[in-house]
Every structure is written in C-alpha cells, then in structure tokens.
Amino acid sequence: MSAPPSELVPTVRPAPTDDRLAPLRDRGRRLLDSRFARALRQYGEDVLRAPQGVQPIERGSFTRVLLLWAIARTVNFGLLWGFYSIAKAARWGFGPDGERLGTFFDYLTGWDADRYGQIAAQGYPMSLPMNVSGDILPNNWAFLPVFPYLVRFLSGATGLGWQPVAVLISLAAGLGATWVLFVLLRTVTKPRAAWWSVVFFSFAPMSFLFVLGYSEGLFMLLVFSGMLLAIKRKYLWILPLGLIAAYTRPGVLALGLALGILFLVRFFRRRVDPFPVREWASLMAAGLTIAVAGLSWSHIAQEVTGTKNAYIRTELGWWLDYVGNDGFVPFTPWFRQAGTHLGVVGIILVIALLVAFVALMWSRPVRRLGLIVVSYIFSYGVYIFAVFLPQQSTFRLLMPMAPILADDRWSSTPRRRTAILVGCLVLQAVAILLLWTRGNP
C-alpha cells in the first residue's frame, strides 16, 4: 500500500532567522524618533536653510557705514580726551608702571600698544625674563608680529612716528572691519538686523580700541573677510587672510575649526549639495594652513629663545597674580580662576555660563544666521573657554564674536535698540575709566 502524497514530499521548514540585531534596530528607530533627535534634525534644517529676508545691498550703503564709523570714532576720541584731561590734571599714574601721563598719543598707545612700539623698534628678545622661582614673566613674545612690523614699515615709509602710525592703522582697519561685518551680515540676515548689529558694534563698550594702537581692528577685518569668503565659497582666498591673521592676534584657530566644521557638513551632504574636488581641496588647504599657522608661534618662540614652551609660559606670566604658577591644561582656566577666588560658587557660575552659551547657540534666531556664522561663533567660544584665563582682557577678547549681534532679538523693537545703544555709551565711558585710564585692559 503506497503512502499518501503528503507523506512522500519532504516537509520544508523555514530557516531560522537570526534576530539578535532586532533589539538594536528597534532601539535605533526609537532614538531617531525621540524628541532630542527631532530637535537635532530641526536644528540642522534651520542652520542649513537659505537665509530669509536677505536683500541686495543698496547704493550708498558704504557712505552710511562710513558716516556711522566717523560718528562712533568721534565719540571714542571725545571720551578718551575727556578722561585723558582728567587723568593729567589729577596726576594719575598710567600704564603698567604707573608713570605720569605725557602726550595724548602716549595715552592712545599705552599698555599693550606700547609693547607693539617696542617690537617695532627692537624686535623680539632673545632671552626671557624670569623670577626667582623660574617662572617666565610677561614679555613681548605674547604679542604677534604683523601689527608691529606693519607699524615699522609704514613709519619708515612715511617718516611719521610709530604712535600716529599705529593709531592710523587701527582706525583704517576698524573701518574695514565695520564695512566687512556689514556686508557679511547682509548676506545672512535682514537689512534691519544687519544695520543695527553694525551700530552696536561701532558703539560697543570696548569700541574705543579702534582708536588705540591695538591690533583688534586688523584681526577682525581679516577674520570677517574670511567668513564672507567662506559664505561665497571662495575657499582658497581664505588661506592668505588666515595666514596673516594667525600672526596678528591669537584666535585664528577658531576660524580654522569653523572651516573644519564646514568641511564635514559639506562632505556628508555632498549628494544634496555637490562638493567638487576644487572646493573641498581648497577648503581643506585653507583650514589646515590656518591650523598649522595658528600653532606655529609657540614653536617659533621656542626656537628663537631656546626656552621650551616659551610662548605658553610667557602667557602664563600674566596668570601668576591670579592663579599662581600651575601649568597650562586646556579647558581648565575658567574653572581655575573661579575656583581660586570664589570656590564652589565660582565653579557653579562657570557651569551656568556654559549652559547659557549652549542655550544661545541653540536658540532659533542664532541658528538662522547660517552654518558659517554659527560654526565660527561656536568655535570662538570654545577657543576662549579652552585657553584664556577670564580677567579684564576678556571683554576685548570677545569682540571678534560680533556677528552674534545679528540675532534679531537685539534690534526687534525701537525701545530695545535705544536701551542697548544708551547702555553701550554708558559702559564705554566706564570701560575707558576702569579698563584703560585707571586699570589694565
């Protein structure tokens, strides 16, 4: 008797499936669907979205900016002359040695500007001053060479003294920085926000630096120009500007980091936003050159003086009176300063500042300024937190973060604009008194 057909055909059992990865896939899906992931995607969309409300720059805009700059510099000179007259009449000491004031140009080229004058005349020292403990004391290696050597060149070419030349360079560079900032912000935000950003920048509490023999104006001209070129995707032209900026003032590493962020974003979005070889090669070259140049001064100082870590130890010479002679560890200076003078309360305050900075960068009005501005502001904030000890100079060190003023919340109402402008003028007078005339900047 034959078997039924069902018994003659072998039963085919489905192969066992390996679902060990299923929990991981489910966890990944849940993570991608989480509120935090959705917020990150929204952040990315906002940063990468084409700017809204941007309009072409009108004819006559440069004349407006020039007039604004002239008025602001007149205010600077007026306030400085007033405090100079008071200080001279009261016989106040001025500068690190508390000497009697001389001419108005002596007043405009005091403190760090005087060190630029020394470098212009004598170059850099071959040996470094030290105290009995072996700590390197403040010296001219803390100041980068572009500004003083430019002063030396123009002074020799024109026959003018180094003091008026230094002030004139600062004035011209400040005008250039103001105009480039205006053009930069007009490419990322609405005309009103861009204009009032430049107004606040021109009358800011530390804006009097634009009429002193300081290098801040030249540095900002170079960095803002680099950001504008990055927005226009003319990456190769950033290279020479970044190279000059690297030897003008500390801080160019922030621009290099911002270019690195830009490179990564463009690389991972190359399918939706083509990233041709010419662009990625020039962007990589600019970013790497800026990074190398930004780190090179430490090696130059070490080679010339024969002293290991000469530049870093020179910078630490300014820290001795605040936090002692402990070595430099990145991302600790703010905690060291706060912990030394305020204890646990200081540490909490630093953490609160960090949270506030992250909240500012996360806010929608800031993220809408676009990838370049957001990346640079973030990078510069990280740089300041990583390497600088917070003290009086922190206020002027924050000036290159001026593009953040394009956040339209600053200029949203006439009352707010008026209040900020009045506050800038009052604080400028306070800053000239406390951070220039009576104390170090």
Image (spheres, rainbow, N blue to C red):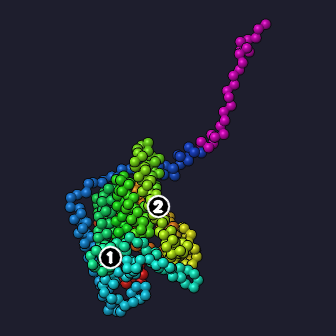
Chain part drawn in magenta? 1-26
Query: What residue appears at the point 73 percent right and 14 percent down from the top-left corner?
Result: 8
Q: Which residue was labeled with disc 1?
A: 166
**Does the magenta stretch mainly form a helix, a strand or a loop?**
loop
Residue 413 occupies which quadrant of the picture?
bottom left
Q: In this view, does 97 lie above or below 3?
A: below
- For residue 332, side relative to residue 435 (left or right): right
Residue 380 visible somewhere in the drawing: no
Label 1 or label 2, whichever comes before in sequence order: 1
Residue 377 occupies which quadrant of the picture?
bottom left
| Three-letter amino acid code at the position of disc 1 | Ala
Q: Where does residue 190 sit, x and y in percent of width and height?
A: 30, 57
Real-space Cα separation, disc 1 to disc 2, in angstroms: 28 Å
Query: What residue appears at the point 65 percent right and 37 percent down from the top-left corner?
Result: 19
Residue 201 visible somewhere in the drawing: yes
Q: Where does residue 36 sit, x and y in percent of width and height?
A: 52, 52
Query: Residue 291 has which mark?
Result: 2
Q: Where does residue 34 sit, x and y in percent of width and height?
A: 53, 48
